[in-house]
Every structure is written in C-alpha cells, then in structure tokens.
Image: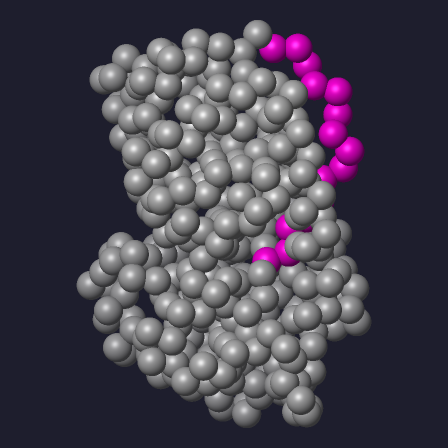
Amino acid sequence: MFNFRNLYGSGLTESIPSLCRGLVNAGVETDVYAPRARPEWASEKFTMHVHPTVPGFASLGWSPRMHSAIRQMATNCGLIHSHEIWTLPGHYASRVARKADVPCVISPRGTLSVVARSYSGWKKRLMWRWLRERDVMSATCLHATAEHEREDIRALGYEGPIAVIPNAVPMPLQKPEREHRKLRRLVYLARIHPIKGTQVLVDLWRNLATEFPDWELDIAGVDDGGHVAKLKAHAAKLKLKRITFSGPRFGEEKSRFLFSADLYCLPTTSDNFAITVGEALAHQLPVVTTKATPWEGVVTHRCGWWEEPNSEAVGRALRQAMAKSHDELEEMGLRGKHWVSNDFGINPLGQRMSDLYQWLIFGGEAPHFISFS
C-alpha cells in the first residue's frame, strides 16, 4: 500500500505511478492513497483511493478521511510504503504502520538533503521534532534512489536498512516525424522553483541568446510558489529574446514537447533523482545537468554533461552542447535512450522493489541492494 501527497508536476507524480506499474507486473497488489489523482490513472491496474485535504490545509496535507481509510486498510495489507516527509499523510502512514505492526518503508525523495531542508526551514524543523523524526528513525526500511541520498539519510542518524533502488523511467512511443522549425530548441521541464536552478538558466540565457541566435529557450513546468511571475519579470527586465514560459506539460503533451526539442537542461542545486533527466533521455534528448543529481552516467554513456551546480559550469556545458551540430546531438540522444531503456525499465525496478517487500515481510537473505552502513 502506498501513501503520498500528490504534487502535480513533481517527480512523485511521475515516478510513483511508474513504480506501481512495475509492482503490478511483478504480481504485487497495489493500492495508492492520495489527495488528488490525474484522470488517466483511473485506467491503471493499481487501485487509487482519493481522499482530499480539508479546505485551506492543502499545504499541510491534513486529511482525516485519508487517515481513517489508511487505518482500515492496514488490517489487510502486508506493508505500507510512504513517499512523503513534510506533510501529514506521511505521518499517517508511519503511525498506522506502527499501531498495526506492519513493515513501513519511507521514500524521502530527496527531501532530507541539507539544501531541501533549508527551504521553509523553521516549519520543517518543527515537523521533524514533533512528528517525523520518530517516524523516520523507527521505519522498517528507508528507500534511497541514489547513493548520495543514502548518505543524506545516514547523516541524519538513521541506523536501519536502506534500499538503494533508482526510479523507473517510462519509455515513450516511437519518435514522431518532427515538424520543420527555423530555430533549434533548448528546453527545461521540471517544477519551477529556485532549488531547480531556473534563475540560473534565465540569467545564462542573456548571453547564450546572443551567442547562439539560431536557438530558443522554452521553460515548462508547474509554478511552485509563484516563481514563474518573478522569472518573467526578470526576463523582461533583461530584455531577453526567444524565451518562453509555456506552463505545465503532462502525458502526451509532455512527450510531444520533449520530442520537439534538441537539448534539455536541468541546472538544479538539489535533487534526489531528477526523473525529468531520465524522461529527456528516453525521448532521445542529450542533457545538461548538475552533480546535484545522480546522473553521472550521462558522461559514461556519452549522452550529456554532468557539471558542478553553479552558473559558470552549467554555462560552459551549454555552450559546448549548443555548438554541436544537429547530427551530433541526435547521436548523443540515441545513446541516452538506449541506456535508459536498458537500465531504468519499469519491470526490472518494480521487481526489485517487490523483492524488498518480500524480504521485509517474510525475512531471509537481504537483497543485494540493501545497505546496512
């Protein structure tokens, strides 16, 4: 059973459904509890249970109905897996698991890093002290999507087992015939928030737009906290040309958006996995991202740039990428697609999570991806 706070446009609303599909394919009966759901999830093989938050308390995730529903389900489930730290649904899951004496897995999803905890810091300190520290430290197992997240978890003092399992990346349909365009396209697609480096990208575009007049920049994603308006005002102040803020992209529209691009950039300063990088690679896009993500493989597989999370390094990588020919970027994109398809498939990673559940419920030898240190 899953419990998570549904953030439209966040990595959770991409990675968790993909994980659920893999679990179902591995034979795991899967129920998902969330305050909201996308319409397309109604056709999925996992079961959605939607319990809205109390009006005015969405940011806190206060939902007595969800809490009650999870309590009822706990009497018949083998394990509870929570994907939320800083709102009440995550606490509901941990508390119910303790009382029902069922294993509880928590996936922090990058929210326990030093950078992530610095945003709304005093609120998170209160939540941690009053509720979540006990929940996390008493969890049966924590799930990290990369080694650097495992290190963040250990730094907080958690001594239990940690499963290191990357997110699954859904593969799109075959690439369609692309429409003819005069300009080449650099895109950003992620939550619009300072932690993701959008301000850095806008500032870099001031010079890049002049140096590369045959390129345009399209920044897409959900507005988190009103930052889009600030970025638009900043871009207008700088008199930037060929820059667009095109809003959220989901489903087929997102796929068309990525297929229409030539290069993807995520200059984030903190990210536990950055599934949008994997999605870009799956759409045959070379990527420019930072060492705040676990995507160092873009260098090994020659499909992108993995740089220090600062303006100078990202700008240097973008200049190198934008100077490449169309054919060179196409070749890089193909290598990236093959890599993601082979290493981040929904079914093998769903099976790995299923193996974790089996071990936590029935015992036996620990799977190879479990870390005790």
Q: Quadrant of residue 365?
A: bottom right
Q: Is residue 172 magenta?
A: yes
The one of 215 and 1 positioned closer to us in this rendering? 215
Main secondary structure type of the part rendered in magenta: loop
- State whether residue 176 is above or below residue 38: above
* Colour scheme of the rendered structure: one colour
Identify the residue shown where x is 59% and y is 39%: 302
User: Which quarter shows the N terminus?
Assistant: bottom right
User: Which quarter shows the C terminus?
Assistant: bottom left
Across and down, in percent, residue 144 comes to 50, 67
The one of 249 and 291 positioned closer to us in this rendering? 291
Identify the residue shown where x is 36% and y is 56%: 59
Left or right placement of residue 254 versus residue 140 in this view: right
Q: Tell me if I can see residue 314 in this picture.
A: yes
Q: Tell me if I can see residue 61 in this picture.
A: no
Identify the residue shown where x is 45% and y is 26%: 320
Across and down, in percent, residue 291 comes to 41, 49
- State whether residue 95 is above or below residue 258: below
Range of magenta residues? 167-181
The one of 271 and 63 positioned closer to us in this rendering? 271
Q: Is residue 130 magenta?
A: no
Across and down, in percent, residue 348 comes to 73, 63
